[in-house]
Amino acid sequence: MGKLQKGTRSPWSIPPSSSRAASVNLGSVQPLINIAGRAMLFWIIDRLELTENDSLFIAISEMVNDEFHLDSQLRREYPHLNVKLIPLRFDTRGAAETLFIVAQSMTDDELQRRTVSLDCDTIYFPEARLLSRIRTLPPHHGATVVFDDAGDPPVFSYVETDSRNRIVDIKEKIAISRHANTGAYVFPDGFSIRQRCAAFLDQPLKSLALGEYYTSSLIADMIGAGFTFVALPIPNSSFACVGTPPQLNDFLKTISQKQDLVKRRRFCWDLDSLVTPPCVFGDYRTVKPIRRNIELVRQLHAAGHCIIISTSRGMQQRGMLSHLSLLCITDESIGAADGNVNAAVADNAAVTLATLAKLQIPYDEIQFGKPYAHCYVDSRAVNSLLDTQKEIGWYAASGASRWSGKGSVGGMLVPRSFNAVQVIENAVVKSSTSEAILGEIYFFSRIPTDIKDVFPTINTLNFVPSTQSFSLTMQRVHGVTFSHLLVGRALTVGRLEKYLAALSRIHSSNGIVDDHTSVPPSLASRLNALGESPSRNIDIYANYAAKVSERYKAFLPVYLDLGDDHEAIASRLLAFLHDFEADDRAQAAHVIHGDPVFSNALFTKDNTVVFIDVRGRQGDVLTLRGDALYDLAKVYQSLQGYDFALLADPLSAQTAELVDLVSPVDRRLLQDLQSVFWAFVKKHYTVDRRGLILITASLLFSLIPLHDPPMRPLFYKMCKAVMAQVREG
């Protein structure tokens, strides 16, 4: 572990939100809520004693960043700081899981530094001297920043200390003392976070007292493992928690009365956000005040902020539609435009100024001649038709704010094009008119008893002759795909081992079915006709050489576009697969999944693994049987970075090189997970490593035509990279 002295570099982590605001909708994404015209997140960063040698990690939902471009905002606001935005691919199950993802994203140098985790809803004032005090902590020590809390009920985490100020106990939502945590947690280094978090996250949520991976629970676990944490007290007046609507409103009230807490800002108001349209068309003397917004302007002005009023009055009548401004490219036309602006000012200035005076609307600047348009697009705009006070983030003593509601987010991978998937309450309905779905239906109608728990509970299997449509209804499984865990840097060694253990159970199944799922006669006849029987031999090699050769010939133009070496690659892979079949090297199993890539497995809230999207087919025969090595090759395919391509933004993935799509940090994590994979396979299977690698390469080679044209070169390079592992090994 690296030693930390005053002035040395440290990484700081700000998770996306706090549990205090998890059940309320603040009208926007919490870290981006405005406080006196500036985002809450920037309020926090502005007041930290960061240096250019520090690393600042900010973890936030990938969807939020895509919508609000927070990464661009951070670069603009803090060009001299080393800010790293960590996109979260799924809803984490607590701050500790978010913290683990951040630690997974650190470089080796950053992992050696002291690390601080901050909530996104707590602002520290200069008198707290937060980072200065943290920098002077003894080496190898962690800490929690605490304050004196006499509140009831207890809503924070609390610590109990010994005579040397060392933390001996820490509890979430239980007031074991009056020392409550502010939400700032200090760890000895990033390595300790990554190692202890991995073990902590492998505990089932149901085994934790509050069913969430709290940072306080992680620290309790670390203290039990021998780590030293101390309490770092700060005055109650040196910070402000703004995580709930009442807390935020209290803080807005405070800063509206203390001008020294807020930097002077410039607010530009459209006149039409302060007064109504004229009651008599064209007569601006007949406008009415929008009192809530006027009161807000008065208070902002009284607090020392600059008020600019802009108006497009008269511009429409004078022909100054916004598109004409774009056409003013000659000296003559520019002169005409200036004339129209002057005319608009002459027509409306006097009555506008009189209205402002009459309604006592203060201002520092006024701008006439704003181009008239039906829609204004502005990265800094606030919609005055909403709750303007809330949108700006200002406490207006006489105004009522409208904080209410709740929200949620979620997401899954897109289903295959020939399937339709609907989620109806706690059920998932999968339907198709293609017989490709029959393999899955066949499998789920015959799940062996000893492995039923690793698949969803099947409610109904059906066939509608009139529409020639097949469907299966299963119980909805609440969880996150292993694809999202991998790409989101949340796949621990323990989670991967659970996945591999569940897959191994499938391969070890005795295949005995005690209770068949009910199937209507019209569907049963289809399944019996296509399913395995004494008269229909099962070829567990059907998805190897024959399939690769057939697809290569059928899509030869696709492969011709990929490079001159496609024929040599195809020949080498087919030669191996023919030898593999001739030597009968498959590991026959009563049951295989058929496509256990990470997108087809869910990690539940109970820390169990549930597989979906099974194949149930060998060639044209419906069956559960197959080669266990085929499944293992599919897993190894995911460990090459396949899921990064599946979850990548399509536009960026089209032009990305494989090395760009999988970052150096992710490549390191993949290599670590590959080591776990090989260790498990060596222990539980009899496998030729070279053979399994080449099977994986053949799978990647054969799937190329199934993907959109821009993605095909990416998978071609991935195939060649896997083949290169044989030479390296």
Image (cartoon, rainbow, N blue to C red):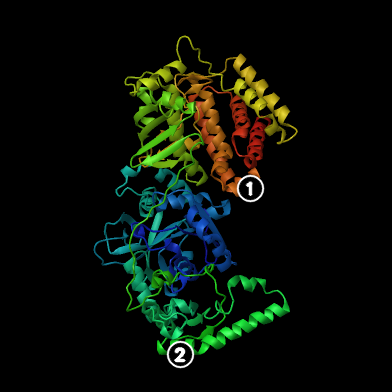
Q: Number of callouts in the render?
A: 2
User: In this rendering, would 174 be left or right of 333?
Assistant: left
- Please give the residue where the numbered disc 2 appears in the rendered image: 354
Residue 4: x and y in percent read 52, 61
- How dense is the environment of label 1, judged by Cα within 10 Å: few (below 14), some, or many (20 and up)? few
The residue depicted at 32 percent of the width and 21 percent of the height is 515
Specify whether residue 61 is in view.
no
Quarter of the image holding residue 251? Answer: bottom left
Residues at marks 1 and 2, CA–CA distance in whole angstroms? 61 Å
Considering every residue shown, the one lying at the far top of the view is: 535
- How dense is the environment of label 2, judged by Cα within 10 Å: few (below 14), some, or many (20 and up)? few
- Label 1 close to label 2 by CB (< 8 Å): no
Quarter of the image holding residue 150? Answer: bottom left
Give the camera-side residue of 340 and 171.
340
Of circles 1 and 2, the one toward us is 2
- Residue type of the residue flagged with mark 2: Ala
The residue depicted at 55 percent of the width and 60 percent of the height is 71
Who comes first in sequence, dot 1 or dot 2?
2
Considering every residue shown, the one lying at the far right of the view is: 564
- Please give the residue where the numbered disc 1 appears in the rendered image: 660
Q: Quadrant of the C terminus?
A: top right
Give the camera-side residue of 516 and 11.
516
